[in-house]
Amino acid sequence: MVKYYQGVNELKCEWDQVFSAFWQRYPNPYSKHVLTEDIIHREVTPDNRLISRRLLTKTSRVPQWAERFFPTNVAHSAFILEDSVVDLKSKTLTTFTRNINHARFMMVEERCVYGMSSENNNWTQIKREAWISSNLSGFSRAIQECGLARFKNSVTKTLKGFEYVLAGTQGETPAKTLRETAKEATEKAKETALAATEKAKDLAHKAGSQQYV
Amino acid sequence: MNSVGADCSELKRVYDLCFNRWFAEKFLKGERSGEPCADLFKQYQECVKKAIKEKDIPIEGLEFMGPKREKSSSSSSST
């Protein structure tokens, strides 16, 4: 049995900007789990389509209940292969992405078609399909459910990463999220508090020395 | 972004720079210019293929763009 996912997202940028950003999307603040990225095949076909195969290494966090399926000597990194075709005639970028290790535990296959949005020609639409499967008897259902939840989460991160890279290529700084701003404020407050404590200690020390000299 | 082969990251960086320029300035404008950055790509590939072999990463024998498949009946949709 396979879990199927389908979704559509929009990026508020023109298709050619999105296609360029596709090759420059790593690293970004939402891709900390991506460790390495390589092009391992590339060619331009006689009908002028660009064909590429990209290899990614990602950290793969396994749920605690699933740890037992992994021998302790096996590295937890996941290797991901992403094939893509850029077709200028149809103004589309089609990708097919799948993990190539840990596949018995869980296989996630994703197909995306990036193209001009039907609502707005200045926007880009991403049509996404994914198939999540597991061959681990007795656990496959739980693993698929978990895999689907994670996949949805990763789609959000992918989009945020794309928006970040797109804003960068257009010479803008992306707006900080509220959470980021709050985190910065907290850190600043901590620093100030620490500095104040140090200062107080210093003053107390000086006062102490004066008393006893 | 780093390469899977620690020694290949610099070769990759130089190739990426060349490719990204080619992609935006030539390919997307419909100019036919053959293989992009061929020499840089060759050097980078020699390095990265060696690293993949050393790390035993199973990249061989996988169909380009995967198998053709139908939508599954057990479906879950989301936007």
Image (spheres, coloured by chain):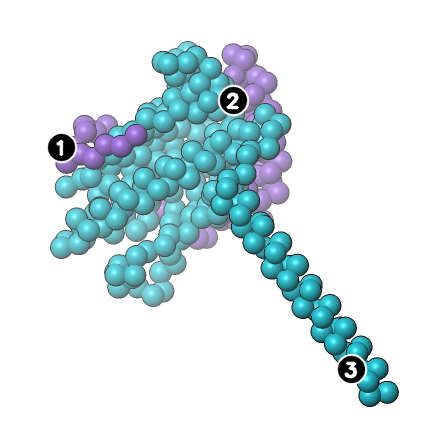
Chain colours: A cyan, B purple
Q: Nearer the viewer, mark 1 or mark 3?
A: 3
Q: Residue at x 67, y 68 (%)?
A: A197
**Label 2, on which residue?**
A17
In the displayed structure image, the side of residue A186 where residue B67 appears, left or right = left
Residue A23 appears in the figure: no
In the displayed structure image, the side of residue A87 where residue A171 appears, left or right = right
Q: Amino acid at mark 1?
A: Ser
Q: Amino acid at mark 3?
A: Gly
Q: Residue at x 69, y 63 (%)?
A: A195
Label pair 1/3, CB-CB below 8 angstroms? no
What chain does badge 1 belong to?
B
**Label 1, on which residue?**
B73
Secondary structure beneath label 3: helix
Decide which of tag 3 and tag 2 comes sooner along the chain.
2
Q: Are marks 1 and 2 on the same chain?
A: no
Q: Amino acid at mark 2?
A: Gln
What chain does badge 3 belong to?
A
Residue B7 is situated, as x and y percent measured from the top left of the image, at: 58, 49
Q: Which mark is residue A208?
A: 3
Residue A139 is situated, as x and y percent measured from the top left of the image, at: 17, 54
